Image (spheres, grey):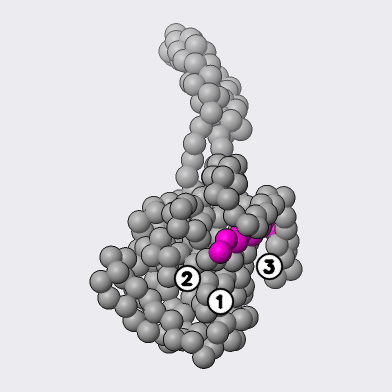
C-alpha cells in the first residue's frame, strides 16, 4: 500500500511542479507599495521666493530652495494617480498632496498632458511619445533606450527633453518603474535641477501572483489521472 501512495504523491508533485513552472510571480517594488525617493538640488534660483499652491489655487505657501538641499517625496500608492503624496522641498513640507499637484507646482510635467509625467510617470512610453510629439514644442527629444547610473548600477531609462516659449524641461525616468531620476526645469525665474540620491521601496507583504493557461492544463491532467489512481488504491484495500 505504501508504494502506490508514494507513486501518487510523486505524480502530484510533478503536476504541481509543472503548474509552478507556468506561474509568473510579479514583485515590482514601487508598483505595488509606497516608496520614498530622495533627491539633491543641484541648481536653483536661491534668491527667489517660490509659491506652492493648493490644487484648487485657493491658497499658497512661500518657500525657497537652496542649492545642495534635499527633496524628499513619499508616495503612498504609485498605482493610484490620486494617491496621497508628501513632498519636502527647501523649507516647505506639503502633506497629502497629489502627484499632479506636485507636478504642477514644480514643473515636473506639462500642462497639456497631466498625470503622464510627475514623480511617477506613465509606463505607456509609446503613447507618451506620440502625445508629446504632437504638442508643437520648439525643442523635443524622446530617448527610450537611454541608461541612468544610480549607485553602482546602470538602469534602463527614458530621457525626455522639451521646450516652448514658457517652459524648458529635461526629465529622466526608470523605464520599468516610472520613478523619476533627474529633472532640470526652467519656467521664467523658476529654476530647479535635482537628481536622485536615495530610493527606499517598501517590499510588498506578498508577491502578486498571476498564472498562465498552464494552471488549467495542470488541473485537467490531475482530473484525468488522479481519480483512476485513487480507485485502484481503493480496490487494493
Residue at the spot x=59%, y=66% of the render? 168
- Camera-near label (3 vs 1) is 1
**Tag nearer the camera, 2 or 3:** 2
- Which residue, given by chain and number where applicable, does mark 2 sit on? 106
- The residue under label 3 is 150
Do residues under tags 2 and 3 come within 8 Å of each other at their CB atoms?
no
Judging depth in this view, the residue of 193 and 32 nearest the camera is 193
Residue 4 in view = yes
Residue at 61% x, 33% y is: 21
Q: Secondary structure at mark 2?
A: helix
Magenta segment's dominant SS is strand
Looking at the picture, how far across and down is residue 42, in whole percent? 63, 80
Give the answer, above or below, for where 154 lies relative to 126. Answer: below
Q: Mark 1 and mark 2 in contact (Cβ < 8 Å)? A: yes
Report the magenta residues as a range.
155-165
Q: Give SS at disc 1.
A: strand
In this figure, which residue is indicated by the disc labeled 1? 192
Amino acid at each position: 500500500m505504501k508504494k502506490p501512495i508514494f507513486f501518487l504523491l510523486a505524480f502530484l508533485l510533478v503536476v504541481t511542479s509543472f503548474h509552478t513552472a507556468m506561474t509568473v510571480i510579479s514583485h515590482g517594488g514601487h508598483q505595488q507599495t509606497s516608496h520614498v525617493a530622495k533627491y539633491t538640488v543641484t541648481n536653483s534660483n536661491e534668491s527667489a521666493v517660490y509659491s506652492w499652491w493648493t490644487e484648487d489655487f485657493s491658497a499658497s505657501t512661500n518657500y525657497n530652495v537652496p542649492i545642495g538641499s534635499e527633496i524628499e517625496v513619499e508616495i503612498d500608492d504609485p498605482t493610484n494617480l490620486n494617491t496621497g503624496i508628501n513632498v519636502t522641498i527647501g523649507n516647505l513640507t506639503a502633506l497629502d498632496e497629489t502627484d499632479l499637484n506636485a507636478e504642477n507646482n514644480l514643473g515636473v510635467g506639462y500642462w497639456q498632458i497631466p498625470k503622464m509625467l510627475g514623480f511617477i510617470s506613465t509606463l505607456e512610453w509609446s503613447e507618451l511619445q506620440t502625445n508629446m510629439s504632437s504638442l508643437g514644442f520648439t525643442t523635443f527629444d524622446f530617448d527610450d533606450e537611454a541608461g541612468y547610473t544610480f549607485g553602482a548600477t546602470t538602469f534602463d531609462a527614458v530621457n525626455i527633453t522639451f521646450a516652448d516659449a514658457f517652459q524648458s524641461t529635461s526629465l529622466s525616468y526608470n523605464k520599468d518603474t516610472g520613478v523619476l531620476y533627474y529633472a532640470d526645469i526652467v519656467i521664467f525665474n523658476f529654476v530647479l535641477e535635482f537628481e536622485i540620491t536615495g530610493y527606499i521601496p517598501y517590499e510588498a507583504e506578498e508577491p502578486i501572483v498571476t498564472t498562465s493557461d498552464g494552471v488549467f492544463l495542470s488541473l485537467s491532467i490531475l482530473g484525468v489521472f488522479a481519480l483512476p489512481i485513487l480507485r485502484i488504491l481503493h480496490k487494493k484495500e
